[in-house]
Each structure stands twice: as C-alpha cells, then as structure tokens.
Image (cartoon, grey):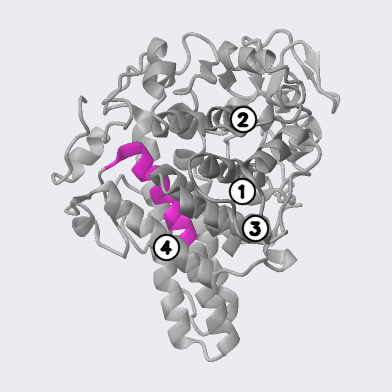
Amino acid sequence: MKRIIITVSAVLLLAGCSDFLNIRPEGTTTSEGLDYTKGENIIKPISAAYAELRSYDSSSFPLLGCLGVTSDDQDKGSTPEDGASTKEMDEFKYDAANELISAQWTGYYNIVSAANNAISQMGLFKEQLSSDDLKAEAEQGIGDAKFIRAFAYFRIVTMWGNVPIIDKIMTSEELAAVPQSTPDQVYALIVSDLEDAIVRLPEKWAKAYTGRVTKYSAMALLAKVYLYRGNWAKAAEYCDQVIASNRYGLLENFRELFSVDGEYCKESLFEIESTDLGKSNGDAAYSTYAYVQGPRNNTPNNMQGWGFGVPSDALIQFYADRGETVRPATTLLYRGTTTPEGDYISDQCPNPVYNGKVYTPKSYNDWSGNGYGYDHNLRVIRYAEVLLIYAEAISRGATVGALSGKTALEALNEVRARAGLTPETEATTAKILDERRAELALEEDRFLDLVRTGRAATVLADLGYVEGKHNLFPIPSTQLQLNENLNQNPNY
C-alpha cells in the first residue's frame, strides 16, 4: 500500500525541481513560504528530499546505464540502433561527455542539495516550535536527511572517487569553487552522517510514515559502507545489530518480494517509492526505473517499456550452472511466455528476456499512455543483503556477532534456503560473493561489487573494461567547465 509521505512529496518534487541546473542553487526546495511554528510543515522538506531520490537522473535510465549494463549480468537491450549513450556504457567506450554519467552526477548532487536544505529547515523548526514533541520530530527529520545525504555520497564516491563535499547551503558561485575531497574525507562524512542518523531515527515509524528510513536502515547502509572500506569488524557489527533486532526476516516467497504487494515487507530496509497514486494522468510520484526496463513493443500498451537492461547470457548460464530455479523464475522474464499473474509477454518483443524483478502486472498500470511499472518501488537495501554482508565480513576475518550469535554459514544458508538450494558446508568468501550475484542480480550491485573486490579487470575484460580507468567514471565535462577546481579522473 502506498503511503502518505509520497502524496506529500509528489507536489514538492514537481514544484521544486523543474529548473535545476548542473550546479543547483541551494535552498530552492521548500525553503520559502513555510511557517516554522506549525508542526504539520515539518514533513515537507524531508518529503522533498525523499522525492529527489526517485528523479530520472538518479534512479532511472542513467542509473541503469552506469551501474546496470556495465556489469556482466546486464546487456543494453532494446534495439541495436536505440540508446547510443547506453551502448557506450555497455562496451566501456564512454567518456566525460556521456549524458548518462552527467545525469547521474547531477541527480546525486541534487539529492545532496535537497538533504542539505532539509537539515537547514529542521534547524529553523527547532528554533520556532514551542512543543518539545515537535522539536523532537524535527530532530528525527535531521536523521532522515542525513541518511539520504549519506546514501547519495556513497554512490558519488564509489563512482567518481575524488569529489566535492557539499554539506551546507551554498550559492551557485560558492558551489562552482568547491575543491575536490579525497575518498577518505567523503567516507568520513558518510560515516558521521549515518552514525548521527542512527541516534536520531526511530526503530520504526507509525503506519502513516511507512517508507521512511529507520535506525536499522542506517545501520544496514553503514555496514555496506564499511564492507567497501574493508573494515570487516564494523561491517559485521552493524549487521549483527540489525539481525539481533528481530525486526527483519526473509520473505518466504521470492517472487512476492518484488511485487507491488511485497513493498515494505519484513525484508525491506530501504526502498525508493514510486506510485501513480492510482491516477491515469496528472501529477504523480512515480519513478520510471521499472518502465525503462519493461518489455519493448509488448501489448497491451500499459505492458510495455523501453526494453533496456536485459539479463545477459552470462547471468542466465550462471543460474543454470548452479541449478537455480526459484530466483531465475522471478529474475528472468521471457518473451513468448505468460506470467503467473496472467500477462502474456509478446513473442514480438525484440529481446528474448527482460528484467523480471521490475515486472508489474497489467492490473497496476493505470497511467494512460503506458505507465508500465509506475507503481514499482526500487529496492535498495534488503535483509538478504544484510545477511550476505555479515557472512562476507566474517569470512574475511570478523568475529561472529555477540548479539545474534549467527555464524557466516548460517547467514549464507538462510539466503540459500529461501532460494530452494541445498545448504553449503563452508562459508568461503568466493561462495558468498557468488550468492550475492545470484540474490542481487539486476539490482545495480554487481558492477561495483566487481570493482571493490578487484575482480572487474578479469571478469569484465572481454567487455572492454580497463583497470586503472573504468574503476571510476569520468567527471562529466560539463562539471569541469562549471568548476575549474575539478581534476579529471585518470585515463579520461
């Protein structure tokens, strides 16, 4: 069920984001006209920050191009002549002028900007509200904003390395003069933001605010950050707290996990909301993440999309070699077949298989003129990944968590059991990484996983990947023109 936070943020998103430039003027989202003495206004800047998460630039076609088709699990898809910029990504022939890379940079920094604005606005509410309860609500809002900012910077630093840190409201002139910070400095901000968010955020929200992140969402993201930093002890520690909370578990039915009805289930720690609000046209709070991956040229009209980001032969073979049936039955959506929900995928679609994790049944697609997948949330952090981060951290030297007492093998086999696989007898790092690939396929995780574990140069060599170059994306040429303090990444 879609939640009230989204109906609030839909209006703010449309009102505040239409005129953003490559360097966005700070304070342009919900900073004017707010009465800071009214508690009902507290949610508005926070909602606007959440709304920025689902923008086209950050969470749609550019995301698929940069972190999807660059992996060995997804190919460009669509038709051969369609999507030149995506083809560049698929073949590692992109440069600083690639529009998808530029959009990702802009999208994530717009999220940072909205979060900075929300933090500033929460300070004004705290100053002018008279109720201690409402002041506490504003404090919680800072937690939301710091989580959102940390998430954006985690994507930014893993994609570009040395990047500007924008952690307060600035003018366009000030933004254009900010120097690059080192990855260590960026990660320090991310860790600080998430530690602060853990303190501020509640363990759960009232039903009306389902979808807002909690302290456990922040713990899960911080665990992943530490995994990328190679701090196995900290990664295991934060996963252990999530596991020991007993608030999360694996949804028994893998297919239901990626359905509209499965949104915000017991496995969900962070999702990016998308909804058409049950309307056929007008303003709505949808993302086109699922739409751009929907079966191309499918029928009827509301069952088709652009057809990009299709599962690769390598992924299909990987599943087959493992004897997998449960996960590929959901992950792989074949043309010429009828889904369990009764939708026929036309045999006239140009690609033999599409991303089944974004499949959205016809009954949900209300929008006139397509609207495929507008009700499909983007799953970002799931409990299954928490278990796999925990298992990997222990396999690399961390100790078993004192709170949960769960072993790496138990965590690994819990994920495998849901997939209908026989238990492993040993939780090696290699087996856990294979399990990550199988479990998180087509969720924009594989490429960065290969880079962080040093396997990209081998696994992606035949696709065009060059070590020392493609481990980072080029800083967009438009940003180099706007800010002369920026230096391009190596070999671009």
Q: Which residue is mark 4?
A: 193
Quick check: 212 left or right of 471? Answer: right
Looking at marks 2 and 1 on the same chain, the residue that comes earlier in the sequence is marked by: 1
What residue did someone put label 1 on? 271
Residue neighbourhood size for the residue with mark 2, other residues' Cα within 10 Å, grouped as few (<14), some (14–19), many (≥20)? some
Identify the residue under disc 2: 435
Query: Residue lying farthest bottom?
Result: 130
Disc 2 to disc 1, C-alpha distance: 21 Å
Which is more toward the observer, 12 or 344? 344
Query: Judging from the image, what secondary structure is the residue with disc 4 in?
Result: helix
Q: Amino acid at mark 1?
A: Glu
Mark 4 neighbour class, 10 Å CA radius: few under 14, some 14 to 19, many 20 or more: many
Estimate the x, y position of residue 310 in percent, counting from the top left: 58, 19
Q: Is residue 97 left or right of residue 444?
A: left
Q: Magenta segment, which residues?
A: 146-161
Identify the element where label 3 is drawn.
helix
User: How far apart are labels 4 and 2 at the CA level?
Assistant: 30 Å
Q: Is 451 in front, or is 241?
A: 241
